Image (cartoon, rainbow, N blue to C red):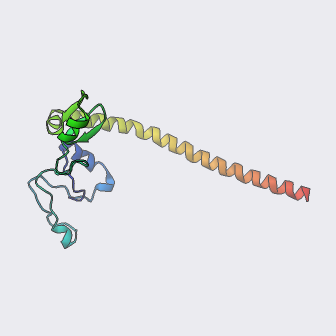
């Protein structure tokens, strides 16, 4: 409810894995309005529509329901009829979502992220060490310049 988004099962798992999103209220699709939450009374009156309603940027009356693998873009049927005639990798999103083995894909993404975290930590530590080394070198050079200036004077 806080993100005002519809999520599949795999995305709910991903959403729950971020500690910054711990306070968000997740409800099943049968719940149309906020329940008793800590939101203000005006927020409690908001509700999600019964179906996803993301509209096409070019054709505002059409829903985004197509995906082009060739161009890594989404749009409505009209966009794809006009702009993606020659593309081979066009998918109807509602059908594609049903065929994706989401649990396996989610597991692979999680493994890749877990592998990347130690590497990024190492890079971050090295950069912090480099910054500290640069500060020390700068301080040493400033002292040398001051001493040289005193010697010249």
Q: Is residue 114 left or right of residue 25?
A: right
> Which residue corresponds to the image point at 14% horizontal and 39% vertical from the top-left?
94
> Which residue corresponds to the image point at 56% horizontal and 42% vertical from the top-left?
126
Residue found at the far front of this picture: 82
Residue found at the far bottom of this picture: 41
> Which residue corresponds to the image point at 10% horizontal and 59% vertical from the top-left?
32
Viewer-side residue, 17 vs 63:
63
Viewer-side residue, 11 vs 46:
46
Q: Is residue 114 left or right of residue 14?
A: right
> Which residue corresponds to the image point at 68% horizontal and 51% vertical from the top-left?
136
Residue 27 falls in image quadrant = bottom left
Q: Is residue 31 left or right of residue 1?
A: left
Which quarter shows the C terminus? bottom right
Q: Position of residue 114 (x, y in %)?
A: 37, 38
Q: Position of residue 31 (x, y in %)?
A: 10, 57
Establish if 38 lies above or below 24. Answer: below
Q: Position of residue 130 (x, y in %)?
A: 61, 45
Residue 30 falls in image quadrant = bottom left
Which quarter shows the N terminus? bottom left
Establish if 121 lies above or below 43. Answer: above
Q: In this figure, what is the number of numbered marks?
A: 0
Q: Position of residue 47 (x, y in %)?
A: 15, 62
């Amino acid at each position: 409810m806080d993100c005002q988004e519809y999520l599949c099962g795999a995305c709910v798992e991903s959403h729950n894995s971020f500690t910054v999103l711990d306070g968000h209220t997740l409800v099943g699709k049968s719940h149309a309005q906020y329940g008793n939450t800590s939101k203000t009374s005006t927020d409690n009156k908001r509700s999600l529509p019964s179906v996803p309603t993301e509209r096409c940027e070019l054709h505002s009356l059409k829903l985004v329901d197509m995906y082009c693998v060739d161009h890594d873009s989404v749009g409505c049927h009209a966009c794809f009829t006009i702009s993606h005639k020659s593309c081979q990798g066009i998918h109807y999103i509602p059908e594609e979502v049903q065929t994706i083995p989401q649990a396996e894909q989610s597991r692979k993404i999680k493994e890749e992220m877990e592998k990347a975290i130690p590497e990024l930590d190492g890079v971050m530590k090295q950069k912090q060490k480099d910054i500290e080394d640069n500060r020390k070198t700068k301080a040493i050079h400033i002292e040398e310049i001051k001493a040289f200036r005193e010697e010249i004077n």
